[in-house]
C-alpha cells in the first residue's frame, strides 16, 4: 500500500492523513476552526483502528484523494 492515504468521516467533521500503518494526523473541524492531532499507535486497538481506516473504511470513512484533502485543509488555513 502506498502512503500517505487520506480519509474523512462521512459527516465531514474530521479528515485523516494516514502516514503509515502506525501513524496518522487527524484534522478536526469545529465551525471555521481546524485542530490538528498527531497520533502514533502503540497498542493493538490503536493499530486496529488504523488498519480499519485503511482496509475496512466504508462504514465510517470515505476515501478522498490527496488533492481534495489539500484543498480542504488549505481552505481552513486561509480563514484564520
Image (cartoon, rainbow, N blue to C red):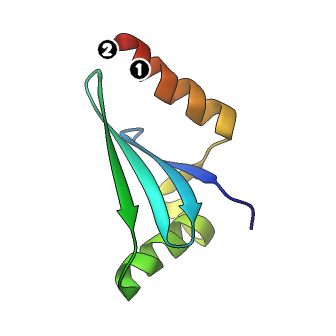
Q: Is residue 2 left or right of residue 14?
A: right
In the rendered view, tell whether residue 63 sits above or below residue 44. above
Label placed on residue 80: 2
Residue 17 position, x and y percent, is 53, 50
Residue at horizontal 57%, vertical 58%? 19
Residue 56 position, x and y percent, is 57, 70
Whether the residues at callouts 1 and 2 have beta carbons within 8 Å, the answer is yes
Image quadrant assignment for residue 14: top left
Q: Which image quarter is the C terminus in?
A: top left
Residue at horizontal 50%, vertical 54%? 61
Question: How much space separates mark 1 and mark 2, taking CA atoms?
Answer: 6 Å
In terms of secondary structure, where does tag 1 sit? helix
Residue at horizontal 54%, vertical 50%? 7
User: Around disc 1, counting alpha carbons within 10 Å, would you say few (fewer than 14), some (14 to 19), or many (20 or more)?
Assistant: few
Label placed on residue 77: 1
In terms of secondary structure, where does tag 2 sit? loop
Amino acid at each position: 500500500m502506498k502512503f500517505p492515504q487520506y480519509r474523512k468521516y462521512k459527516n465531514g467533521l474530521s479528515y485523516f492523513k494516514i502516514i503509515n500503518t502506525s501513524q496518522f494526523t487527524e484534522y478536526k473541524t469545529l465551525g471555521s476552526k481546524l485542530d490538528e492531532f498527531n497520533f502514533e499507535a502503540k497498542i493493538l486497538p490503536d493499530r486496529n483502528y488504523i488498519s480499519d481506516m485503511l482496509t475496512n473504511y466504508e462504514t465510517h470513512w470515505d476515501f478522498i484523494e490527496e488533492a481534495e484533502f489539500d484543498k480542504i485543509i488549505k481552505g481552513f488555513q486561509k480563514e484564520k
